[in-house]
Image: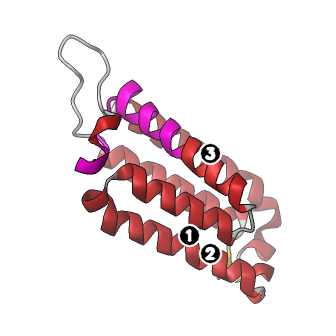
Amino acid sequence: MIKLSELHLGVLTALGGIALLLASAHFVPMPGQAYGAGTMPRLIGWSAILLGAFMVATSLRHLPDMLKPHLSDWVYKPRLALAALAVIATIVSYIVFADWLGFIPVSFVSLFVLMLVLRTRPLTALFASAVSTLVVYYGFSRLLMVPLPRSEFLSFLG
């Protein structure tokens, strides 16, 4: 992996904020409200632009060193490289299996496997995965009213 400098990350952060603003530009406010679905994406987009600009501005004093990307030290450690691959595999498996199996089982298994790969004790990983999955599920599905993928065999959870 290539280690990016603060300058590179600042530019990427600002570009991500711009992309978020462009993607949420067509979101309309709720009827009778001054805000809607685009409020949080726009707020996050502007925050990312400001953060990226700040990172670029603070990194300009070390400009010659920052323009040269170099490999990170963790790339040469097999356990850490495996952890990075596990994160990518988890993201891909969520995309592939979440609609079929539902959010809760896929998230639980993903968190549990990632914690085991990162050398968390199995009992701690089991407990933390279960609690985290349920907190995220109820936070998004009940509080924020964001529909998450569901499976029929866990329909009793609401």
Q: Quadrant of residue 140?
A: top left
Residue 69, visible in the rendered structure:
no
Amino acid of disc 3 = Leu
Instruction: Report the magenta residues as a range.
Output: 133-154
Question: In the rendered image of this protein, does residue 93 appear above or below residue 2?
Answer: above
Q: Residues within 10 Å of mark 2 (few under 14, many from 20)?
A: some
For marks 3 and 1, give the CA distance: 25 Å
Identify the element where label 2 is drawn: helix
Q: Which residue is mark 1?
A: 87
- Judge from the rendering whether residue 136 lies leftward or rightward of residue 119; answer left or right: left
Q: Which residue is mark 2?
A: 84
**Residue 134 colored in magenta in the image:** yes
Amino acid of disc 2 = Ala
Q: Quadrant of the C terminus?
A: top left
**Residue 72 colored in magenta in the image:** no
Q: Residue at x 21, y 30 (%)?
A: 28
